[in-house]
């Protein structure tokens, strides 16, 4: 196992009727609260009313319209509101996009200079406004981590930043809020959480046995509950889904192990290029990364095949079969895993490799996915 440090200060409030705890969770010292949400799902599923009831005695200013794949230009409007209205606490209500957006708003409100530098130039975040979250879509783990992914459509960009200053103070996880999720978003959430674990588990084998078993527990949970989750509202399976998705990316399975993230960063470029949903890009790219890095990943792919899919045989055949099982799993959720099935213009694919050449780094746990390999990998996914 590799050396590591672990820090995660997020208070989780999990279960039914927990949104009403907001009045106690947000200290009365905070006078001006900015409620940030997306396109309106919280209004149709009662989450908005629950929040407003809980905060009836407080000064709440609203900012709505944060897009799926939150856009930098939209978020900057909220940064201006924070400054003008002397906002001292932000509440994010929604999925990963709203939460990630709030992370940039919180950091941007304190940032000296252009907040785009936080993303584009790795500008150091020295402090941020405190914020809490009400999660309505299990998927990203953003409710319990310090990462944020922000798009800037005007520049064709989708970039990541990370800072200890943007851990939420608290996150409310009420599985009841998922009642209104369409099946496409449920499938996205299952796949995103699944691939978060894969990015931290199917890498170089460093004998981190506990983390491997924890990873396998999350993957097996997602496989076990998927059909029930997709089939309608069942509280216990939604609860298991929500907690599994949080555990997939709250840092625990990733300590002391090499991490990959190639599928994610290449997937982000496909979202920037074609507007495909985050999880859809992952399901397309992952088989290409696994094939390209097969020798380096073979030991862990075989372990995954045996312990998650109950396969048997020699390492090479189990690893290949495990890849097939994974693709079948994503397809069983209704997600199409090749580019042509999404009808995108594949002539534009070389742009992805050009982006990585300009960033000046090669993704992957062994930093070996060169721009040439990325182009080849994507061509294999047409
Ligand atoms: O905008 P509203 O109206 O709320 O609708 C949303 C949105 O259209 C809807 N939705 C959310 N909760 C709902 C609901 N509809 C009905 N009922 C509910 N309870 O779902 C749509 C998608 O929401 P979004 O927040 O975009 O989805 P998700 O949670 O999958 O977030 C995706 C974003 O997170 C980033 C992705 O790149 C993408 O930008 N990621 C963030 C990570 C992190 N911070 O650690 C890691 C991930 O790998 C990922 O990259
Ligand atoms: Zn993801």
Image (cartoon, rainbow, N blue to C red):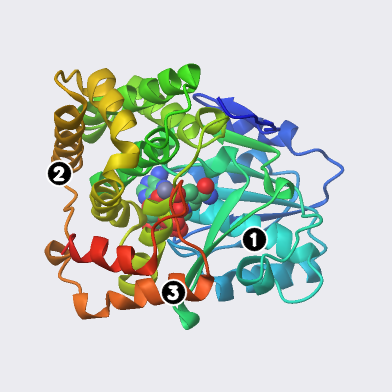
Would you say the residues marked 1 and 3 are in contact, meaning their CB atoms lie under 8 Å apart?
no
Comparing 322 with 23, the one in front is: 322
Relative to 225, is 328 above or below? below
Q: How far apart are marks 3 and 2 (CA)?
A: 29 Å
Furthest-front residue in this view: 295
Comparing 233 with 193, the one in front is: 193
> The residue tagged with tag 1: helix, strand or loop?
helix
- Residue 184 x/y as whole percent: 25, 49
Q: Which of marks 3 and 2 is in front?
A: 3
Q: Residue under label 3, please give it.
A: 355
Q: Residue under label 1, please give it.
A: 104
Q: Which residue is drawn at 25% across and 30% down?
A: 226
Neighbours of disc 1 within 10 Å: few (<14), some (14-19), many (20+): many
Neighbours of disc 3 within 10 Å: few (<14), some (14-19), many (20+): some
> The residue tagged with tag 2: helix, strand or loop?
helix
Q: Residue under label 2, please give it.
A: 331
Comparing 156 with 179, the one in front is: 156
| Mark positioned earlier in the residue sequence (1 or 2) | 1
């Amino acid at each position: 196992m590799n050396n590591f440090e672990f820090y995660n200060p997020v208070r989780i409030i999990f279960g039914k009727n927990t949104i009403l705890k907001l009045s106690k969770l947000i200290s009365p010292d905070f006078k001006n609260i900015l409620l940030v949400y997306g396109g309106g799902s919280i209004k149709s599923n009662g989450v908005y009313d629950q929040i407003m009831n809980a905060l009836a005695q407080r000064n709440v200013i609203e900012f709505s319209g944060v897009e799926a794949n939150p856009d930098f230009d939209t978020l900057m409007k909220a940064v201006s509101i924070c400054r003008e209205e002397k906002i001292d606490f932000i509440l994010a209500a929604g999925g990963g996009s709203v939460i990630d957006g709030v992370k940039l708003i919180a950091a941007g409100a304190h940032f000296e200079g252009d907040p785009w530098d936080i993303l584009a130039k790795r500008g150091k975040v020295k402090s941020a406004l405190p914020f809490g979250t009400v999660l309505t879509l299990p998927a990203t783990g953003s409710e319990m981590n310090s990462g944020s992914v922000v798009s800037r459509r005007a520049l064709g960009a989708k970039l990541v930043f990370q800072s200890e200053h943007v851990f939420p103070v608290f996150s409310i996880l009420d599985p009841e809020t998922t009642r209104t999720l369409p099946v496409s978003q449920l499938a996205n959430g299952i796949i995103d959480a699944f691939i978060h674990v894969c990015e931290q588990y199917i890498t170089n084998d460093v004998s981190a046995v506990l983390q491997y078993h924890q990873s396998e527990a999350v993957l097996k949970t997602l496989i076990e509950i998927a059909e029930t989750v997709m089939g309608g509202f069942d509280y216990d399976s939604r609860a298991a889904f929500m907690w599994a998705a949080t555990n997939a990316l709250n840092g625990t399975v990733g300590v002391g192990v090499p991490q990959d993230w190639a599928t994610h960063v290449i997937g982000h470029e496909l979202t920037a290029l074609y507007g495909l949903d985050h999880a859809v890009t992952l399901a397309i790219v992952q088989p290409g990364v696994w094939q390209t890095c097969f020798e380096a990943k073979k030991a862990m792919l075989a372990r995954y095949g045996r312990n998650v899919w109950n396969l048997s045989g020699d390492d090479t055949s189990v690893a290949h079969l495990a890849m097939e099982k994974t693709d079948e799993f994503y397809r069983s959720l209704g997600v199409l895993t090749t580019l042509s099935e999404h009808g995108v213009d594949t002539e534009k694919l070389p742009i992805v490799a050009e982006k990585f050449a300009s960033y000046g780094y090669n993704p992957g746990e062994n930093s070996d996915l060169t721009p040439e390999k990325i182009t080849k990998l994507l061509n294999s996914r047409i």
